[in-house]
Each structure stands twice: as C-alpha cells, then as structure tokens.
Amino acid sequence: MTSALRLLFLASLALAAVEAASSLPLKAQEAPPARSVEPPAEGPASPKQAIRVVPDATDAEIARRLQGIMEATGWFRNPRVAVRDGVVFLDGAAETADHRQWAGALAENTQGSVAVVNRIEVETDLRSTLEHVEAELTSLQRRTIQAWPLAVVIVAIIAATWLVAKIVAMTARRVLSGRIASRLLLGVVVRALAFPAILLGAYFVLQIAGLTRLALTVLGGTGLIGIIIGFAFRDIAENFLASLLLSIRNPFRSGDLIEVAGHTGIVQNLNTRSTVLLALDGNHIQIPNATVFKSTIKNYSSIPSRRAEFTVGIGYDSSATRAQELIAQVLSEHPAVLDSPEPLVLVDELGAATVNLRVYYWFDSSAYAPNKINSALLRLSKNALLKHGIELPDPAREVVFPKGVPVIQTRKTTQPQTRTAPVEAPPLAHAEEETSAATPAEGSLANESKALSETAAGSAPEGQENLLKDPPKRNGRDKPGR
C-alpha cells in the first residue's frame, strides 16, 4: 500500500512537471493579442488615463484610424467605430473572445482615447468553434513536441528517486532488523529514512520544471502539512502512536488472557488501529489502542502462578482449628494446587451465625481453569467438613416480638408413645466421585483458552498484520511447583 502511494505521488509530480514544461514560453510566430479589462456593455465607462483638456487628435481621426485597423485584420464582421468626446464605441462581431479583447485593448492604447465601450459580439457558430478547437490542439501539439526532452529528464529523475529510496529502505531494514524488535517501529524508521530521498527527488523535478518557488514551498511546507494532517486525523494518529508504544513495551503477547477497559479476553491481534480480544464467551472485542494504552492492564498470563480464594462458613460449636486442618489437607492433596506459595486457610470473620474461613491457594493458570478448580475445591472441602462433623449452618434469622410471647398451659393428655427409628443419612451415591479431584461435570480442570483460540483461529475481524510477539513455548506439567 505504501509503495503504491509513493508511485502515485511521483506520477502526480511528473504530470505537474509536464504541464509546467508545456507552458514554457515559445517563439511566437505572431504577436499575441493584447488583453484589457473590459468595461460593462452598458453604463458609463471609467477613464483609463488622465484626460487632457485639449485633445491631440479629433474624434473623427480616432474613429478613422481604428476603423481602418479593424478592417485590415479581417477578424471582424461589420466593424463600426464611433467616437464622441474621446469615448470610443466599438460595434460588430468577432470570431473569438480573444479578438474582441484585442479590439478593446487597441482602442485603449490609441492616442486621444479617453474610455472604451466594447460592444463587439462574439460569434458562437459551429464552424468558428471547431476552428478554435483545431487551433488549440495544434498549439498543444507544438508545445508538447518542444517539451518532450524535459519530460524524459523528469521521468528519469523520478525513476532514480524511486530506486534510491528503495535501496535506502532495504539497507536500513537489513541493518536495523536485529536491533529493533518491534516490527511497527522498524517500518516507521525505514520509511523515515527513505522519505528524504523522495522529497529531494520532488525538489529536483520542480526545479527543472522551472517551478522554483513551488519547490521551496514543498520543502518548507512539509512541517505545516504534517501539523494540518495531525489535527485532521487526531484520533487515527493517536491510535497509531499508541500501537507503536504498545509494540515497543509489549505489556502482553498473543494468547495472553488480559483485562483492560472493563473487558476480559484472550489477545488475538494488535494492529495499527485497535487491539482485538477474544472474550471467554467466544465474541471478538475491538478496543482502540489509545484506550488500551491509557487504561490499566491486568495480564493474567504474565506469570503462570495465579492466586484464587473462596470462603467457607462453619458453626460456632465446631472447631475452627479442625476445619482449617481439613481444608488444608484437601488443598495439599489436590493436583492443581501449588505447594509454593503455600495455601492458606485463615479465620476471616465472625459472622452472625458462622465463623467464616478465607481460603487462599495458588495454581498454574496456563494449565488449569480457575472456575473449575474453585468448583472442585469447594466440593471437596464441603464433603471433608461434613464427614468429620463440622457444621455448615445457614445464616441465623432473628424474630422480634415487641409485646412478648404469651404462654398458655394446657392439660397434658396421655397418648401412647411410638418410637421412630433414627433417620440415617443415605449413603453417597458416587463415593468415588465425591473424593476425586474433578468430576465429569467439572471436566478435566484444563484451561479452555487454548481450545477457544484454536476454534476462533482465522475469524478475527481485523486482517492486518499482527504486531505482537508470539507467546513462548512452555513445557506443561501435571503439578507445577511440586
């Protein structure tokens, strides 16, 4: 795209140079007609020169002289000249507007003429129009033939400029590719080094074409044009600069799970306009790079170890120490929980009806899904506490009676008492699954980010080049840190 724009820019310079060359002065075979500012056809004519009180020529002499000249040219049909007190009135018909203006200029430059009222009409018949077109084409052909050597030189300069810019760009890319890691920054630096060659070539083209002032304007107005473009495309420029800084700083890589600007997703693409995230529900989210750069970025994949937590409430009659030991044993036996940093089971709060224990543990976020691990640990902790007699009560509900509770004593009637067998808790239907690290409903506890990225591969809405680095390959382990 950049090469095409560069060629289009050079081609426009060539066309401008050809037009400038074709407009160079030629040796005229006949003197061009003089041009004058025409007064209105009706109304008073403003004097063109100082009016003498005693004229040098009489009105009749002025009219006779102008009448003879107009008839001698053969350009006018029925020319009539009338002069009253130095004011010249021209009537008749002319083949072209140039002839009409020429007659007005002739009358203005005649001795004794004070003002000119040009009432000559221009004939607009088809024959005169075709003749005028033929004359213009002939003149254009003559100028083109005379200017073709200059056009050849300009085309050669444009070709040399393009070749020099290409060589400079290739050399700069080869030298800087090992020193600049960001592909976007490398492209910007290469274009910045090649641009002076193009600018110098444009200056030479305009200089040879005789447009010296325009050449100086091009060189001096580059900064002004940059400022104007910056104001007109402020948002686009801001996103481009943000993408440049993000590609240099690399706060995340492709495939990382991040949270930015209130959105959580897997990084799919970073282009010159936006950052594309794949949300955990399968939708693509495009966030402008300026927003990403100015927002707080939480990268869940920057460090594999990630901490999670959950709360368990036990009854006041139960032993908090025993509950801590049971939950700690569940954490130590689970394959997804890391030994370092060690898991913690802390008494967090004395609630209205429960003693709340806060459980902290670490796991490998690249291998396990946090919601699946949390489900498995909550299930195992609940089973372990209930098995060892730890109560998990509901929140207490207190009923207040403002007027008290009336007590009514009734006669006690003797009724045969029947003994009921104690209700035993039904055995667990799936005892093996109750103690397993993961149930079929919880899946394999594996992180679904990789599978989600593979499913959505090739469906990103942005087709531009990805400016992010590929994520490093890691050797997966069943129990990292153990």
Image: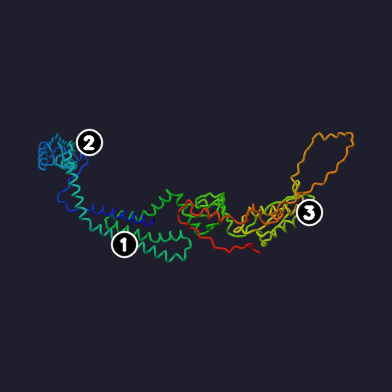
Q: Which residue is mark 3?
A: 319
Q: x, y percentage for residue 130?
A: 18, 43
Structural distance between the alpha carbons of marks 2 and 3: 112 Å
Q: Which residue is mark 1?
A: 160
Q: x, y percentage for residue 384?
A: 74, 54
Q: Give the amino acid at mark 1.
A: Ala
- Does dot 1 land on a helix, a strand or a loop? helix
Q: Is residue 325 above or below residue 42?
A: below
Instruction: Between residue 428 and residue 442, name the one nearer to us.
Output: 428
Is tag 2's residue or tag 1's residue first in the polypeptide sequence?
Answer: 2
Q: Which residue is mark 2?
A: 40
The N terminus - image quarter: bottom left
Structural distance between the alpha carbons of marks 2 and 1: 54 Å
| Res 82 → quadrant | top left
| Res 199 → quadrant | bottom left
The tally of labels here is 3
Locate residue 329 relative to residue 209 in the image: left or right.
right
